[in-house]
Amino acid sequence: MRKRLCLYFLLLLGVSLSAVGRTKAPIRVACIGNSITYGYGLQDRDREAYPVLLQQFLGAKYQVENFGKSGATLLARGHRPYFQQEEYHRALAFRPDIAVIHLGVNDTDPRNWPNYRDDFIPDYRHLIDTLRSISPRVRILIARTTPIGVEHPRFESGTRDWQIQIQQAIEQVAETAGVELIDFHSPLYPFPHYFPDAVHPTAPGTRILAETAYRAISGNYGGLQLPSIYSDGMVLQRERPLALRGTADAGEEVTLSFRGWRGRAKTSRLGEWSITLPAQSAGGPYTLEVGTSRRRIQLHSVYVGEVWLCSGQSNMAFTLGESSDEEHRPIQPDSLLRIYSMEPAHETTATAWPLSFLDSLDQLRYYRPTSWTGASPSRTNISAIAYHFARELRDSLQIPVGIVVNAVGGSPAEAWIDRATLEMKLPAILRHWRTNDFIMPWVRERAGQNLEARSAPLARHPYAPTYLYDTGIRPLKGFAFRGALWYQGESNAHNVEAHEVLFPLLVDSWRKTFGAKLPFYYVQLSSMERPSWPAFRDSQRRLARPQDGVEMVVSLDHGLKTDVHPRVKYPIGHRLAQLALSRQYGYSSLEARSPEVQHLTLQPQALLISFSGTTQLRTSDGAELRGFELVTREGKTYPLSGTIQGQTVTLRLPASLPTQALWLLRYAYRPYSDANLIGATGLPVGTFSLDVKTHSHGAQ
């Protein structure tokens, strides 16, 4: 009996020891890749390579090994196939429980992709199948490749386009092979300064890679979180389905309740969830609740109404307190006019910024934390134009109105456009921007003053191309707006032709972010003594696409001769509001657009101009008509006088000029102009320059 008990005890002890051994065996993680996995270019790869950091994040229960090989291609017929490298064979011998694969960057080489692109998917499948053959239960995560910057010498000759094709192939492999797809591209894409050679990330970049891999492996995305704009007091856009998005730990079920409606969704492996709230009627305040089994978030005083994004540079940022529209400032609090004002942590004044703030800039922390607030007499540090616009909508619609303001003084248009758009359409503007002629000299000079404490050529600044998109637009992605208001151009007026490329790209960029039909209403520059402004204002006129929801209001009549900041802002907010009411809210009888030339009629010694958009033309001051001039084909300029009858202006032509000498008809074509033609409701005619022969009929 004693022998039998001893034997039983020994058996139990053996089983227990065996179980303990199995429990303590670490989970083996193989990081398979190229020089980026290896840690090429890092000051201390033994501490900074992403597999090393991943080991720290995962802890002692995991054993992470680096099997990166510099120059390696996924393609078996590439110039350095990973299949032929020692690291590949060591990775197989390691028999991983988890494999993180990041290959494809070197396959963009012209020796590889153009010749063997059709092999990429089969070769990737072969790598996956081989790993599964030696470790049948291996968990495989394949990564979208890290970014390749515009400074790469072959960026435009093939690398840019081939990397896009490789990303698509990797996504297809993940789908068809039943492996997990992780994204090494998007988290690093807004940080080009982490890639000094355009390919290899520095230590901050490898930390992002390690964090991305850690979250994918562990499923730990920090629990339930919402974008910062989703907060107490917010306004949600009415009368359209709303996709509310956030993050949570992988696999968690998220529930959302609002006004008696309840929805749910399961968080993806990438920690993302989305729940579509049915279209809501205007009203509030309400409570919106989002929750998981471990956390609940309640947002109070949530309203449903109209929401507009107000952006641009200093004339949009110009505050109520700075303006001279005292009679139009708020008289009493209005909880239904709500403002989300994104304010820079430092204004771009002519000062050197401290290093601590420059570090924040590099990490895309430019705007201060903010919250939704109601309008009140004490709230004078908000955009004057945005407030006057919202006030008029509130008074007309009698529902909640929200405005999101993120304007930055001095900012150029290129700072507000997403990187993918510029890389594809105008990559030259991204290169060496601080010495780049596409960028206005004043913009480069001011950035240099702010960045005086940091000499790094890739140091970030809000004026850098794409920066304000990354910090001020991308964080708002998914939040629904009725439309956008834009007052900008002062920092692009030096190059009309470049702006004619940039402006449509900006509109398209925002429509990719917020919806293809986003109404986009912008302000033509005012009148001021800057020599390039007449041509720029005329260009802005031509950039309008009313049939496509891109429309312009005129500010010519409120300019100051030597100050870029007109103090009177109410008329501009009013004009934008009238345009929005007319186009978006059924107030079709409003005369919301400035009169525009419909056609010219050339007569002996006279030029007749027919205008649309008004029932009656007049002068703003009751004086004689001012602002018209004629330019001959010899380049001589003649001021023209004229008369007004209804919607037609009749200009008297110099008797000495033959009709064949006529070239351009211009109006308000001076940097600072006192032109005085307006429509029936007082809207001024904007700057224009028209070819007489092209736009006229009649005597020739």
Image (spheres, helix red, strand yellow):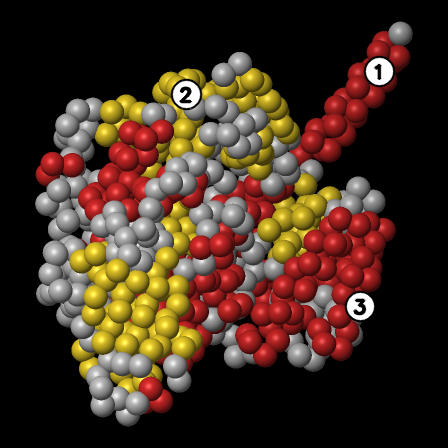
Q: Any mark on residue 297, and which?
A: none
Q: Nearer the viewer, mark 3 or mark 1?
A: 3
Q: Where 405 falls versus 198 (above or below)?
A: above
Amino acid type at image mark 2 = Gly
Q: Residue at x 60, y 51 (%)?
A: 183
Q: Which circle marks residue 119 in the picture?
A: 3
Q: Which element type, helix, strand or loop, lies under badge 1?
A: helix
| CA distance for labels 2 and 3 | 57 Å
Q: How many marks?
A: 3
Q: Which residue, as the protein is rendered here, is positioned at the far front?
A: 604
The image shows residue 210 at horizontal and vertical percentages of 54, 50
Left/right of residue 633 with respect to residue 512 in the rendered view: left
- Nearest the viewer among 85 and 614 is 614
Category of crowding for the residue at label 1, using alpha-carbon neighbours closer than 10 angstroms: few (below 14), some (14–19), many (at least 20): few
**Numbered label attached to residue 283:** 2
Q: Are marks 3 and 1 in contact (CB under 8 Å)?
A: no
The image shows residue 271 at horizontal and vertical percentages of 58, 37
Looking at the rendering, which quadrant does residue 612 occupy? Answer: bottom left
Identify the mark nearer the N-term, 2 or 3. 3
15 w.r.t. 45: above or below: above
- Who's the residue at 28% across and 77% down the image? 606
Residue found at x 80% / y 50%: 176
Gap between marks 1 and 2 measured at Cα? 74 Å
In-image side of 271 versus 467 (left or right): right
Tell which of 245 and 558 is nearer to you. Answer: 558
Location of the N terminus (image quadrant): top right
The residues tagged by marks 3 and 1 sit, at their Cα atoms, a distance apart of: 59 Å
Q: What residue would you read off at disc 1? A: 8
